[in-house]
Image (cartoon, helix red, strand yellow):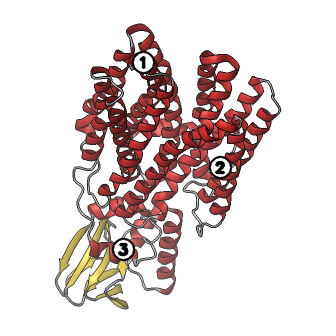
């Protein structure tokens, strides 16, 4: 993708210079931003692995079509329309990847590790993409880059076909009218406004993308007019930023297993912004690459920490919408950054452009820190015993790492002496229980129904059916129990189709055979 972005700007620049290249960049980013929410809607409505497959297939087709338009010397407007569909396809795959990762990781540490590796891949692409583009352009044409990317996308199609997954949609599938599609696609903006913590994280990450959009122009301005080093240095500064991003992505391995992500988000945001500001104070061909490289490392860590935090705090049912909105805002933020930096540089000069870009993310973070810092302040290390017990239950086995993390953060361990009633027939349903140690008797109207032992569970019927307790459960021996509150249990289980079906099937089976357990 980084390579094709270079290709399209070089193609446009060759036709009409910097003004045309800027107009083309804006014309490509805005449609891509409008398409991203529809990818989120597709994730909610269809199987996510199939949406990902369709996204890669669309990338292959549209990249190939762009290459053909360039080879045929089609009018610029025609080529740009085709190229815009290629960028739109990119905005489909990124949100889907971010949504699928939590679904196929089993613990919070796994999720952070997956995001770290994904971030490394992104930064390697940002670093090597322009390098590959330069090598191809040295002896070829921009069209050759799009042709190559079409082949890479076909490899992605083949790899996605091999995924041993069945990831089902979280929403139902009513008839898809035009109004329903629009409401489903852009309703994510409304939902996110209601989720204050999610909104704040997206605000910080979007401000980072504004800075990235600004840097595209600032690299050129710094190289030519501040360092007086020539146009080639724009590429060197961009490569330094990309190389720093790779190093930062490697450093994100330190985040694996961490309970809190907000301190890493705060520290890396400063590491991202402040070196850009320092370039304005001490510009030289020695310091500028080092400072931009340091900034790239900060941006890389900020991205991983922010994405992981989003996956943790966003409710399961709105995860696709969250990343659809984030992708949409990223495209618009890149455009805003490019336009705003140009205006600041033209009006006040390059140093003020660097100063504004360097301060943006830290200022946004400081302004939202009190609320943002509370996102994971109460986080605690995962309880290994609880994780083992819950993952053995078919109800919880399909849950994503963030859903499991939210359950683990709020569950309660109980000790119950022998002979005590744990739940009583007719009482309101308030908790779901998992037996760690001991045995219980399940009875109805004083009549024995069954025994339960370590690894068994009870209490789900009243919660799922919203009815009073259907049986009495009494401790036969001293018990150690995990208790999960009603709201947390329902949020986790009913938000995941496979978990819900499993829980409903278990409840129905117990009702049929008379082995009632709450």
Residue 351 rendering spot, x and y as whole percentages: 34, 16
Quadrant of the rendered structure where residue 486 is?
bottom left
How busy is the neighbourhood of tag 2: few (under 14 within 10 Å), some, or many (20 plus)? Answer: many
Residue 473 shows in the view? yes
How busy is the neighbourhood of tag 3: few (under 14 within 10 Å), some, or many (20 plus)? Answer: some
Above or below 135: residue 343: above
* Of 139 and 192, the residue lying toward us: 139
Numbered tag placed on residue 33 in the rendering:
none
22 displayed left or right of 294: right
Residue 479 rendering spot, x and y as whole percentages: 22, 83
Circles 3 and 1: CB atoms closer than 8 Å: no
Mark toward the viewer: 3 or 2: 2
Task: Give whichever of discs 3 and 2 has the lower sequence position.
Answer: 2
Above or below 26: residue 331: below
Mark toward the viewer: 1 or 2: 1
Residue 231 rendering spot, x and y as whole percentages: 51, 23
Quadrant of the rendered structure where residue 490 is?
bottom left
What residue is pinned by disc 3?
390
252 displayed left or right of 130: left
Q: Secondary structure at mark 3?
A: helix
Q: Secondary structure at mark 1?
A: loop
How busy is the neighbourhood of tag 1: few (under 14 within 10 Å), some, or many (20 plus)? Answer: few
Residue 35 shows in the view? no
* Of 66 and 136, the residue lying toward us: 136
Task: Give whichever of discs 3 and 1 has the lower sequence position.
Answer: 1
Residue at the spot x=77%, y=40% of the render?
Answer: 65
What residue is pinned by disc 1?
228
How far apart are labels 3 and 1 at the CA level?
62 Å
| Residue at the top extreme, as displayed | 347
What residue is pinned by disc 2?
55
Above or below 394: residue 275: above
20 displayed left or right of 397: right
């Amino acid at each position: 993708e980084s390579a094709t972005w270079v290709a399209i700007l070089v193609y446009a620049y060759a036709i009409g210079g910097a003004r045309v290249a800027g107009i083309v960049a804006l014309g490509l980013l805005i449609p891509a931003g409008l398409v991203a929410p529809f990818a989120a809607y597709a994730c909610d409505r269809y199987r996510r692995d199939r949406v990902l497959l369709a996204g890669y297939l669309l990338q292959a087709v549209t990249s190939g079509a762009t290459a053909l338009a360039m080879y045929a010397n089609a009018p610029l407007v025609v080529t740009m329309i085709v190229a815009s569909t290629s960028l739109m396809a990119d905005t489909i795959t990124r949100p889907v990847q971010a949504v699928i990762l939590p679904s196929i990781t089993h613990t919070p540490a796994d999720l952070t590790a997956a995001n770290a590796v994904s971030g490394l891949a992104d930064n390697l692409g940002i670093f090597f993409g322009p390098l590959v583009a330069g090598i191809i352009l040295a002896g070829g044409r921009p069209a050759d880059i799009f042709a190559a990317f079409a082949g890479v996308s076909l490899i992605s199609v083949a790899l996605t076909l091999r995924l041993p997954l069945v990831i089902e949609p979280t929403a139902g599938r009513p008839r898809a009218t035009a109004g329903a599609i629009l409401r489903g696609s852009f309703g994510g903006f409304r939902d996110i406004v209601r989720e204050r913590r999610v909104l704040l994280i997206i605000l910080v990450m979007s401000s980072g993308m504004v800075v990235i959009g600004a840097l595209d122009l600032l690299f050129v301005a710094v190289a030519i007019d501040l360092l007086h080093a020539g146009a080639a240095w724009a590429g060197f500064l961009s490569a330094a930023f990309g190389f720093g991003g790779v190093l930062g992505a490697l450093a994100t391995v330190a985040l694996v297993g961490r309970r809190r992500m907000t301190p890493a988000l705060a520290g890396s945001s400063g590491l991202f912004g402040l070196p850009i500001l320092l370039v304005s104070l001490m510009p030289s061909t020695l310091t500028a690459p080092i400072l931009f490289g340091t900034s790239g490392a900060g941006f890389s860590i900020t991205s991983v920490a922010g994405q992981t935090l989003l996956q943790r705090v966003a409710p399961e049912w709105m995860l696709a919408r969250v990343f659809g909105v984030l992708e949409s805002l990223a495209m618009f933020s890149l455009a805003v950054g490019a336009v705003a930096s140009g205006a600041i540089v033209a009006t006040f000069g390059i140093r003020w452009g660097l100063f504004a870009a360097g301060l943006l993310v830290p200022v946004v973070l400081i302004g939202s820190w009190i609320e943002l810092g509370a996102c994971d302040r109460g986080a605690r290390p995962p309880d290994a015993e609880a994780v083992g017990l819950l993952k053995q239950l078919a109800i919880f086995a399909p849950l994503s790492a963030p859903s499991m993390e939210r359950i683990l953060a709020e569950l309660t361990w109980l000790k119950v002496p022998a002979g005590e009633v744990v739940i009583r027939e007719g009482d309101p349903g308030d908790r779901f229980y998992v037996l760690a140690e001991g045995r219980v008797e399940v009875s109805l109207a004083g009549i024995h129904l069954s025994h339960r032992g370590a690894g068994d569970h009870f209490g789900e019927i009243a919660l799922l059916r919203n009815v009073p307790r259907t049986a009495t459960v009494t401790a036969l021996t001293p018990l150690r129990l995990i208790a999960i509150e009603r709201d947390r249990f329902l949020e986790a289980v009913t938000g995941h189709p496979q978990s819900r079906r499993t829980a409903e099937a278990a409840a129905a089976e117990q009702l049929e055979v008379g082995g009632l357990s709450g």
